[in-house]
């Protein structure tokens, strides 16, 4: 039996004394339920907006750093391969692939590592560390140079792996922190808004590239082609890529303080740290904008000792995790979220590799001078981002809590299957306008479809004690798909092309391969539960009388002896 809980002193308008609200309730499980209900049923307020902005700026930075490299590699070719024997002024394809794949490799490590650690030591202790790593590695990249001992590719690959680890950590942390602080009614929109900052980051990367190109216009116009860009032109391009990369650290610096001072999520404090008093106080702290709740310390420690053995939620452990995931009811969900993300990213990142082909079709791939070439490249990327990607993200935000996650994901995979089939089987019959239209539609339904929902659902459908780990594993499987697209499938498009040619004779077959991946995504999506307007505790199987209820996810105590319910 729990000891009698006495009222404590303290508390004011800013730091509400949560403990006194429920001091008359001896059962810690009931106090937990009432505290979480405050979060679940809270009206949408500024504290929700603050959580979205703090998490969203991280995703803005992630997307900026990931997509800016598409424009930076062409600048690197001008600076570091000016005297190359073959194709002077252009980066070799192997170097280009190494720089891009290194980020995805680091991201896989970060997603798994940070995901697991956030379940072990807490969300708050890990949140902000990944942003520090991103900022440090970004600044280091912008100051990199080649040397006799190490090429510029080796230096950039090293820093981009480290940056990728930080970016990877941001996926599970931002998702689950937003999820665990969100109101049930608008949880999907809040998580979708965080993810939608990717589109804004892509836009910003193209815009910064456009601005620096305009700033060095006079120097760039002196050279008609990249192999003639020497002297002042070469120096200008060297400054340009460093500015474009370095700017990615600015938004991260602005968000760092708020990430380091965000409260621990009450759900983690309840279910993993098993501190009922602190968790309840943190609910009030979050709503008031304070970094942490401040309950009476003596009462908190005493209650933690008395209440910990009474909590219904099983204690996290590796043994419990493998027992939990070995049940098909739970394992199929992890298979569904990880498999869907893997299949999606093969095509999503694979299509991104072919941006240059689309830019060629709309007349934004070349120019009569180095200035026009970089200008057209930036403008073309702005057009692609604004036409399809950004609208898709925000349509998801507007509809995900009404239509639901599962219909959006399955519908997206169905439509993307049709689009890739159209591009793949009718490629040689399509003119430039038709190809552009299909490309824009693909970008729209990626983001108003599985690209958004594969991020949202894993942050909702798992128990708190394993939510971050499961999200990290799901996200990492997606990045493995991205690596396969970049290393194995992407190069197939040049199969059959003559040496030194930039033609893509096998592109139609690559699109057919992507359609097969999209078709498979329909079936993995069937394994994913609908999470719309359901509490995280219901989705974790803790609420009796619901279809999701799983007695193995709660415990009961009879005369102080633990038994499985």
Image (cartoon, grey):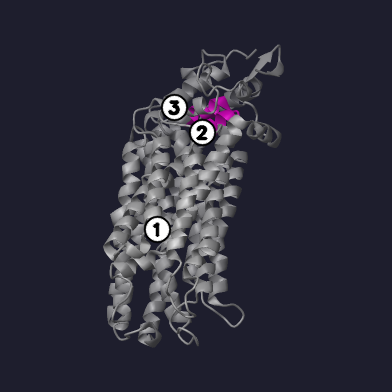
Question: To which residue does mark 3 refer?
Answer: 534
Q: CA distance from mark 1 to mark 2?
A: 38 Å
**What residue sits 46% from the left and 55% below the top?**
514
Tell me the number on the disc at residue 461: 2
Crowd rating for badge 3 (residues with CA inside 10 Å; few <14, some 14–19, many 20+): some
Question: Could you tell whether 368 is left or right of 264 in the image?
Answer: left
Judged by depth in the image, the label closer to the viewer, 1 or 2, is 1
Do residues under tags 1 and 2 come within 8 Å of each other at their CB atoms? no
Badge 2 crowding class, 10 Å Cα cut-off, few under 14, some 14 to 19, many 20 or more, is: many
> Along the line of sight, which residue is nearer the eye, 494 or 297?
494
Residue 326 is drawn in which quadrant?
A: top right
Q: Which structural element holds mark 1?
A: helix
Query: Is tag 1's residue or tag 3's residue first in the polypeptide sequence?
Result: 1
Q: Most prominent secondary structure in the magenta stretch?
A: helix
Residue 238 or residue 341, whichever sits in front = 341
Specify the segment rendered in magenta. 267-282
In the image shown, does 343 or 157 lie closer to the viewer? 343
Measure how far apart labels 1 and 3 are at the Cα level: 42 Å
2 up-or-down from 268: above or below: above
Image coordinates of residue 73 in percent, x first then y, are 44, 71
Q: Going from the N terminus, do you reach mark 1 or mark 2 first?
A: 1
**So how many labels did they put on this image?**
3
Near mark 1 (Cα within 10 A), the count class, few <14, some 14-19 or many ≥20, is some
């Amino acid at each position: 039996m729990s000891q009698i809980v006495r009222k404590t002193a303290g508390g004011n308008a800013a730091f509400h004394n949560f403990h006194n609200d429920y001091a008359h309730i001896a059962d810690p499980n009931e106090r937990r339920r009432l505290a979480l209900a405050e979060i679940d049923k809270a009206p949408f307020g500024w504290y929700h907006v603050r959580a979205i902005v703090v998490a969203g700026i991280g995703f803005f930075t992630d997307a900026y750093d990931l997509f800016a490299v598409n424009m930076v590699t062409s600048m690197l070719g001008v600076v570091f391969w000016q005297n190359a024997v073959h194709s002077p002024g252009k980066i070799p394809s192997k170097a280009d692939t190494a720089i891009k794949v290194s980020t995805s490799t680091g991201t896989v490590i970060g997603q798994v590592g940070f995901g697991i650690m956030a379940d072990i030591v807490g969300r708050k202790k890990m949140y902000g560390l990944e942003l520090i790593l991103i900022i440090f590695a970004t600044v280091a990249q912008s100051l990199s140079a080649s040397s006799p001992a190490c090429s510029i590719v080796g230096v950039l690959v090293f820093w981009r792996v480290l940056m990728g680890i930080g970016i990877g950590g941001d996926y599970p942390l931002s998702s689950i922190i937003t999820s665990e602080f969100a109101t049930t009614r608008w949880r999907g929109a809040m998580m979708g808004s965080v993810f939608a900052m990717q589109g804004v980051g892509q836009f910003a990367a193209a815009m910064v590239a456009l601005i620096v190109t305009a700033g060095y216009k006079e120097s760039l116009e002196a050279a008609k082609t990249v192999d003639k860009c020497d002297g002042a032109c070469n120096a200008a391009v060297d400054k340009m890529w460093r500015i474009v990369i370095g700017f990615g650290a600015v938004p991260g610096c602005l968000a760092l303080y708020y990430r380091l001072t965000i409260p621990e999520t009450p759900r983690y404090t309840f279910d993993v740290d098993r501190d009922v008093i602190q968790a309840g106080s943190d609910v009030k702290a979050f709503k008031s904008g304070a970094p942490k709740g401040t309950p009476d310390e003596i009462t908190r420690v005493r209650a933690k000792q008395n209440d910990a053995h009474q909590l219904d939620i099983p204690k996290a452990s590796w043994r419990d995790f493998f027992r939990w995931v070995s049940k098909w009811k739970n394992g199929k969900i992890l298979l569904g979220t990880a498999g869907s993300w893997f299949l999606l990213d093969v095509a999503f990142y694979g299509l991104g590799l072919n941006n240059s082909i689309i830019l060629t079709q709309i007349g934004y791939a070349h120019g009569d001078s180095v200035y026009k070439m970089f200008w057209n490249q930036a403008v073309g990327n702005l057009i692609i981002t604004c036409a399809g990607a950004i609208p898709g993200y925000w349509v998801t935000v507007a509809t995900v809590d009404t239509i639901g996650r599962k219909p959006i994901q399955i519908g997206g995979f169905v439509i993307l299957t049709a689009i890739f089939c159209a591009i793949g089987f009718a490629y040689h019959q399509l003119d430039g306008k038709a190809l552009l239209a299909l490309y824009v539609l693909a970008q729209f339904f990626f983001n108003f479809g599985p690209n958004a929902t594969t991020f949202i659902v894993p942050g909702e459908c798992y128990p708190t004690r394993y939510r971050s780990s499961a999200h990290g594993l799901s996200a990492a499987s997606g990045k493995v798909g991205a690596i396969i697209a970049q290393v194995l499938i992407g190069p197939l498009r040049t199969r059959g092309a003559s040496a030194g040619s930039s033609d893509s004779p096998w592109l139609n077959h690559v699109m057919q391969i992507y359609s097969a991946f999209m078709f498979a995504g329909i079936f993995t999506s069937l394994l994913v539960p609908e999470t719309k307007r359901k509490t995280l505790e219901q989705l974790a199987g803790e609420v009796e009388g619901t279809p999701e209820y799983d007695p193995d996810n709660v415990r009961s105590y009879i005369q102080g002896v633990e038994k499985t319910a």
